[in-house]
Amino acid sequence: MKRLLPCFALLLSAPATAQDDKILELGRLTYQTCVACHGPDGKGVRAGDLMMAPSLHESAFIKSDHPELLTAIILKGIAKQDNKFVQAMLPLEAILNDEQIAALIAYSTQEFGGTRRNAKPGEVSKWRKEFAGRTSPWKRSDLEEMLAEATTPPFLSKLRYSLYEGKWEELPDFSSLQPAKTGTLDDGHLSLEPAKDRKGHFGLVFDAEFTIPETGDYVFSLTSDDGSALIIDGETIIGNDGIHPAKTVNMKETLQAGLHTMQVQYFEAGGNRTLALSVKGPGKFGTRWLSVEKDEARKAAQSFDPIPLTARNPGEAIVHRAFLPDAKPRAIGVGYPGAVNLVWDADVLNLAYVYRGEFMDAAPHWNGRGSGSTPLGKDRVKIAHGMPFQILESLDEPWEPYSEAKIKYERDNADPQKEITINVRHPDYQFRGYRLDAKRFPTFRYDYRELVITDTFTPVEIDGITSLVRTVKVEGDPDEHTYFRVAETGPQTVADGWIDVGGNLKVKVEGAETLSRKSGNGNETLVPVASGTTLTLTYRWNAPLQP
Amino acid sequence: MKRPLLFLLPLFASSLLAEAPKESDYYTITNLPAPEGASIEGGAIELLPDGKVAVCTRRGQVWIIENAAGHPDKPAKWTLFAEYLHEPLGLAWRDGWLYVVQRPEVTRLKDEDGDGRADLFETVSDGWGIKGDYHEYTFGSQFDKEGNLWCVLCLTGSFTAEALYRGWVLRVSHDGKLIPTASGVRSPGGIGFNAVGDVFYTDNQGAWNGSSSLKWVKPGSFQGNPNGNIFFEFANGAIGERPKDPPYAEGGSRMVKERENIAELVPPAVILPHQKVGNSPTGIVPDLTKGKFGPFAGQVFVGEQTHSKIHRVFLEKVNGLYQGAMFPFLEGFKSGNIGLRLSDDGQLYTSGSDRGWGARGGMPYNFERVDWTGKVPFEIHEMRALSDGFELTFTQPIDKSSAVDSAFKMEAYTYIYQKAYGSPEVDQVKPKVTVASVAEDGKSLKLKVEPLTKGHVHELHADGIKAAEGGFGLLHPQAYYTLNEIPE
C-alpha cells in the first residue's frame, strides 16, 4: 500500500496545473449546491425507501463526453415525473454563473464519472444562449433522446454539397448546371451554412450515403422554404417544389436493409429560408434528424401565413363555405361591405352569429389537410342554436333542440357497442341553396314543411353604426300556431322596441308582434307567423366598431 | 485512322436509333399554368358542351378554361365561375347547370345575369351527414344514363363513421332524389365509369383495405369496411338488410374466404399493389375516344396522387364479378393527380394537389393535359384470365422467338382482410409460367400458369418479350392481375 500511494498521487497530480486545481476547487465548492440530494459521494441520498436523486456514478450523462448536455441539465433542471425520486432537479441557471457550471462539470465528471470532461466558460455561455428558449425543466425522455442523438454516429455519411447560383421558381435540372462551390459536411447533417453569405437565388444539392439497419417502413419528413426534393437510390420520394413558406411533406417508403444513396435538392428564391429533414423508422430506430435545423423548421411549417379573404370587387360580399367554429359543419360565412359579417348555418337553417371587422382567415382551411377557416374581427354575438320555426300548440311547449338521433356505434379500436349520438337533420326542413344579387349578397332559401322561406341580409348604417337588416319572408300558408324564434340569447330586455340579445347587440322586429317567454334558464322572443308574413329584423351593436 | 472511323459510323448510327423508347415518345404532358394568384388544386374536371373545360379546386373555386386543348399554341383563357365552395370533388354538366359535389351537398350552379360568374347555387341534395372532420370528403361522378350522380363518402376518420352514410355510395338524381347504393367504403379518391357505364371507385389502403384498389360499385354491394354499416337502419331497405360483419378478431381473414360468408361482399376489381405502383389512387375515366387517344379504347385510366402518375386498367367480367389487370401508363406529372377527364377528341386532362399528403411531382398543384403523339407504344394491351393461365394481347406484333418461358416471371400474393391498418403481401405463391401458344400474327399469346390462385394478385413481369419491329422490350413489362374468379 505504501508503495502504491505515491504512484497514485503522482497519477492524479501529473497532468494537473495550478489552473486546473482552481477549477476543481471551484467545482467542489459549487457541488455543495447538489449534496442535499446527490450526496457528498455522488451516490444519491436515501429518503426512506426512495432516493432523493439518482447516483451520479450510474449516470450516462456524467459518463458521456457531452458537456453541453450536462450544461442543459444544470441550467434547466429535470421535472418530477413519477415517484422514482423524491425530488425534481431544480433549474440552476439563475444561481450559477458560467465559470461555476464549467467547474461543476469538471469536478463531477472526474469524481463520479471516472473521466474528466472539460467545458470552457465561453462554451457554457454559448450553450446557455442556445437553450434560452426552453422555459420548463427537461423530461427524462427529452434528455435520453438528446443523449442518444449525441452519441449515435451520424445517419448520413460521405455528405457532400454543391452550391448553385440562379433565379428559379422551381427546382432546376442541377445536373446541367455548374456549381459555384462544392464541399463536404463531415458532421453528417444537411445545412444551409454553405449559403450563409448568399441573400437568395441559390440552390444546394446534397449527396450522401446511408445504411438502413433493418428492412421496414421509414417515414421521411422534408420541410423547406422554398422548394426541395428527396431522391433515394435515384428515385424521387418527396417533391416539395415551388416557391412557398416553410412546408412539410411526409412520405413513407419501404427500404431494404443495407446501403442506400440519398440526394436532397433545394433552392431558395428570397425571404425566409429553411431546410429540415428527418426520418422515422421501425422500433428502436426512432426519429433521426438528418439536418442541422430541427423543430424550428417544423414549427414554422405548422404556422401558416394568414390568408385574409377580401371581396373581389369593392362593395361586394364574400360567401365562404368551410368548417367554421361555433356552427355546424354546413356553415356559410358571409362578409359584407361595411365590415359586418355573419355565419349562416345550413344545418340549422338559421343565423348562427354576427360579428364585425375583418371577415375570415382561410389559412387553416387551405393549408395542410384543412381544418376549417377562422373568422377574424370581433364583437361576435351568437344568435341561434336551434331551428327557426316551430308549431307550438301551447306556449308551454318547449322549443325543440337541434335534431339528433342516437345509434349504436361500432368502432374498430374501442368499445364495439358504445352508444353515440349522430345529428340527423330535422325532417321538416330542407335547405335549397342561395342566390347572389348584383352585389353578391346571398338570399338563403329553404323549405319548412309546406312553406318556402327566404332569408336575406343587408348592411345598413344606422346612426353611424353599420347594422344588419335581415328579411325573413314566408311564402305559403303556415299551419296554425307556427312561430319564428327571434331571440334565444341574452337578457332580452326591451327598450324602445330594441331587444337586448347580449354582447352589446340588440334586435328590432318589424312585421309581427313579439312575445317573450321563459325557456330553460333564459328567455325566448317569438313571433307568430301567418300567411304572407315578412319579418324585418335589424341587428345593431350599441357602439361603433373600435379599430 | 480514316478507315476504322468509317467502319464505326454505321454502328454509331444504329446505336442512336436503338435508344430505348420512353413514355414521352407516345404521350406528352403539357402544363397549363394557373392564372396569376390562383391555386388550381383540382378536385374534378368536366367537359362543357362548347369545348370549354371546367375544373373545381380543393380551395373551392370553379374555373372555366377556353382553349385548354390548344394551349400553348392558342393560349388557354381562364375565367373564375364560382369560388369559396366547400372542397368540391365532383363536377358534372347537365341541361345548362353545372353540378358541383361539395363536402356538404350536391349544388347546381348557373350564371343567370350573364356576367360569367355563377349567381344561383341550388342545393340538389344534402342527404348525408358531416361531423366536421377533414376526412369527410365527398367525391362525385358525372351523370349516368339514368341522370344520376354517384357520390362516394369517406369515413369520418381513418376508422370511424360518425355521421349519416359515411362510408357509403349514394346516387343523387339530377332533381334531388337520394338513392343509397352501396356500403363498405373506407377512404375514396375518385368515382367514375368504365366503358360500358358500370361505376367504379378507388379506395385507399388502410383498415379493411390491405392495399389500395379499384372497386366495382355494384348496387347493393358491401365493399368491405363495416364501419358505415350502422346506417342500414336509416336506409329504409334501399339496399336490403345489413350484411354480416367480417371477422374483427386479431389476425383477420382473407377477402376470398369472407366472400363465402358475406353474400353482399364484392372484392376489389383490380388491386393496385400498395407502394409498388402507388399509394393513393384517385380519379377514374374510361377511354371512349375510339382510338383518338391511342390503342387503349374501352380501357380505364386511374389517377395516382402520391406517385404523380396515371395507371391503365383492363377490366373483364368473370362469373359475374369484375376483375382485371393494372399496367403502368404515364408518370412525371407536376403534382398529385386527383381529377381526370378524357375528351372524345383524345385530350386527357388531370389536375390535383399535394396538400396534406404529399406527391412526388413536387408542385403544390397542377393542371396538365396528356396528348397522344400518334405513335403506338409497345405494350401489353390486354391480360385476360383463362382456366389455366392468362392470354396476353399486344399493341404491336411481338418477335415470336422472344416468347419463351424464361421471358416471363410471375409471383402471386394476396392481403390480409382485417380491421388493422393495411397489410403486408401474404400467402406468396411462385407459379410456373410456360408459353402455351403464340398467335400466328404475333399479337397475342397464351400463358399456362401453375397454379392459378383464386383471390390473388398475379404479378407478371414480361421482361424478355421483344417487339417484332425494332426489337425493343415492352415499354412497361409489368402487369398486376387480380384473379377474383378463375374462368371455367
Image: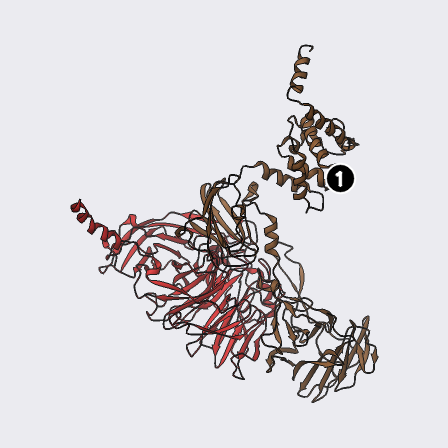
Other residues around mark 1 within 10 Å, as few (<14) / some (14–19) / many (≥20)? some
Amino acid at dot 1? Leu
- Whether A496 is drawn above or below A218: the answer is below
What colour is chain A? brown
| Residue ID for mark 1 | A90
Residue A135 can be seen in this image: yes
Q: Which chain carries label 1?
A: A
Query: What percent of the width, then of the height, locates residue A53?
Result: 74, 34
- Whether A40 is drawn above or below A433: the answer is above
Looking at this rendering, what residue extends furthest in the left direction?
Answer: B3
**Residue at 35% over, 60% down:** B24
Residue B217 can be seen in this image: no
Query: What percent of the width, then of the height, locates residue A55?
Result: 71, 30
Image quarter for residue B441?
A: bottom left
Q: Which quadrant is the C terminus of chain B positioned in? A: bottom left
Image quarter for residue B389?
A: bottom left
Query: What percent of the width, then of the height, locates residue B413?
Result: 43, 51
Depth order, front residue of A522/A122: A122
What colour is chain B? red
Image quarter for residue A2?
A: top right
Q: Which quadrant is the N terminus of chain B positioned in? A: top left
- Whether A419 is drawn above or below A399: the answer is above
**Residue at 52% over, 70% down:** B151
**Residue at 20% over, 50% down:** B9
Determine whether the residue tagged by mark 1 lies in a helix, strand or loop: loop
